[in-house]
Image (spheres, rainbow, N blue to C red):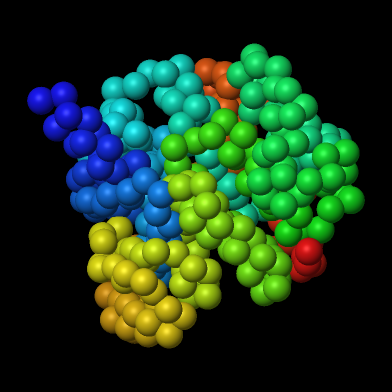
Amino acid sequence: MTTTAASASATAPAVRLRGLTRHHRDVRALDGVDLDFHAGTFTAVMGPSGSGKSTLLQCAAGLDRPTAGRVEVGGTSLEGLGERRLTLLRRDRIGFVFQSFNLLPALTAAQNVALPLRLAGRRPSRTEVREALARVGLAGRERHRPGELSGGQQQRVAIARALITRPAVLFGDEPTGALDSTTSREVLDMLRELVDRDGQTIVMVTHDPVAAARADRVVFLVDGRVAGELRAPTVETVTARMTALETGTATSATASGAPASPRTATSIAALTSIGTSASPGTATPTGTPASPSTTGRRSSC
């Protein structure tokens, strides 16, 4: 009996979503989503604009509360968790990487990486931080500040910061969206290696078929519902599927007049709630650099 239970536990998904629904005023951003993300796999989530991709990621990561449905991370249900327990779960089990890096410019790479542990009241060792940076290919860059690093290197620091707590799952919301094609490829190579070498579980929202093709599977959303998936995707198969979805939904989206679901301000919430139970309205780190979409600059490694 014990062996059977252990076996079932070993095969349980890293993240399980059941009947996930999220309403933003009159807009149904998610509509009864059922998905499993298994440990040691790389999943890309795609769909037309307003399909609910970012909302899905935020609910799965505990950054936003669903209107209905169930989210489980590592076998723990997020439903009914108070803010403090949810904060602790996010800190210990979940990593999140954003498009715009969200590094603190006054801190070195090492200090940015150590920040989640310090917010949790823990003093990380230098070895621990160096290993986290080495894991993303930034050995020797510990003392560099964000302004002294390229865009690709800054995103690697952000990924190292997300991985310092050794989370069960790493979520990425367009993690290569602010990078040029060469740098994007290098970051994707690193993410792929984290899965293949370390068994890391990664769930990534992207609009880029090239990025999606690096995943083990691609899940497609349309109007807040799962619209199929691809296993062992290629750039060609992903592009063809997205073209079909966008063509097929263009008429209904226009007819309904439903606005795209709003993006919640999750970047500050994620940083400030890593190690505290404070709400997003409490004192937060400031000075995060503007994303390249606002500066017009593309970054390279």
Q: Left or right: 124 with respect to 78?
A: right
Q: Left or right: 46 with respect to 277?
A: left
Q: Is residue 21 above or below residue 48?
A: above
Furthest toward the left, the residue is 1
Give the quadrant of residue 6: top left
Q: Position of residue 194 (x, y in %)?
A: 54, 52
Residue plotted at (45% across, 42% down): 169
Q: Nearer the viewer, residue 87 or 224?
A: 87
The answer to whether residue 55 of the structure is visible from this angle is no
Q: Nearer the viewer, residue 259 or 150?
A: 150
Q: Left or right: 26 with respect to 291?
A: left
Q: Position of residue 89 (x, y in %)?
A: 44, 26
Give the quadrant of residue 53: bottom left
Residue plotted at (71% across, 67% down): 183
Quadrant of the image containing the C terminus = bottom right
The answer to whether residue 178 of the structure is visible from this angle is yes
Residue plotted at (10% across, 25% down): 1
Residue plotted at (43% across, 57% down): 42
Furthest toward the top, the residue is 121
Q: Is residue 78 above or below residue 298?
A: above
Q: Position of residue 116 (x, y in %)?
A: 64, 28
Q: Position of residue 56 (x, y in %)?
A: 38, 50
